Image (spheres, rainbow, N blue to C red):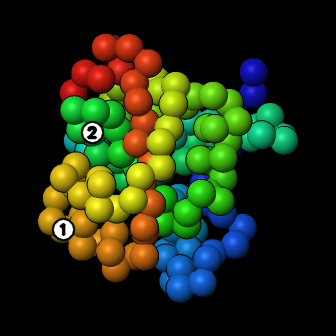
């Protein structure tokens, strides 16, 4: 097994209107990586995924919010996001959040309105400003993954 890549696995193309957010993600990813997934910084988690074509392991910092029905991760770049496509191809994903690993077998894309209750007012406003219209809801594999 190879060591995980330090790449943020961000998209190669930003959708129209998302160019600014894409630039922010490219630069913020490496800065967020050291604190993502840690107990003391619950805003960010790390999605561990394997490239669909390359087989390379990636660790991508993402905004995470846990709710009773699973874990929510905004998709500011839509379903073309590489980590999302990799997770679908693999049939599951591991997310490190608050210092623990959580395993998920299925992912459902929901619109921002459906996920609104899982996020604070500030987070909802930030997602609205960023243009994120889709959110992934990961369903836990078992009860251990759903622990908060």
Gap between marks 1 and 2 measured at Cα: 16 Å
Q: Nearer the viewer, residue 124 or 1?
A: 124
Q: From the viewer's perspective, is 120 left or right of 3?
A: left
Mark 2: which secondary structure? strand
Q: From the viewer's perspective, is 51 left or right of 83?
A: right
Q: Residue farthest to the left? A: 121
* Residue 22 shows in this picture: yes
Residue at the image position 42 percent from the left and 76 percent from the top = 131
Residue at the image position 84 percent from the left and 40 percent from the top = 54
Residue at the image position 63 percent from the left and 75 percent from the top = 14
Q: Quadrant of the N terminus?
A: top right
Q: Residue farthest to the top? A: 143
- Name the image quarter holding residue 13: bottom right
Mark 1: which secondary structure? helix
Q: From the viewer's perspective, is 40 left or right of 128?
A: left
Residue 66 disc label: 2
Residue 122 disc label: 1
Image coordinates of residue 106 in percent, x first then y, are: 51, 30
Image coordinates of residue 134 in percent, x first then y, are: 45, 60
């Amino acid at each position: 097994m190879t060591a995980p890549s330090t790449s943020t696995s961000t998209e190669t193309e930003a959708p129209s209107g998302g160019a600014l957010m894409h630039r922010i993600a490219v630069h913020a990813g490496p800065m967020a990586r050291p604190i993502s997934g840690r107990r003391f910084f619950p805003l960010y988690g790390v999605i561990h995924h394997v490239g669909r074509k390359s087989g390379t392991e990636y660790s991508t910092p993402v905004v995470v919010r846990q709710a009773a029905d699973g874990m929510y991760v905004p998709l500011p770049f839509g379903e073309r996001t590489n980590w999302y496509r990799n997770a679908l191809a693999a049939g599951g994903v591991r997310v490190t959040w608050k210092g623990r690993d959580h395993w998920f077998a299925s992912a459902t894309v929901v619109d921002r309105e459906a996920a609104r209750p899982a996020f604070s007012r500030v987070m909802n406003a930030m997602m609205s400003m960023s243009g994120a219209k889709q959110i992934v809801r990961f369903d836990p594999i078992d009860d251990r993954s759903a622990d908060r």
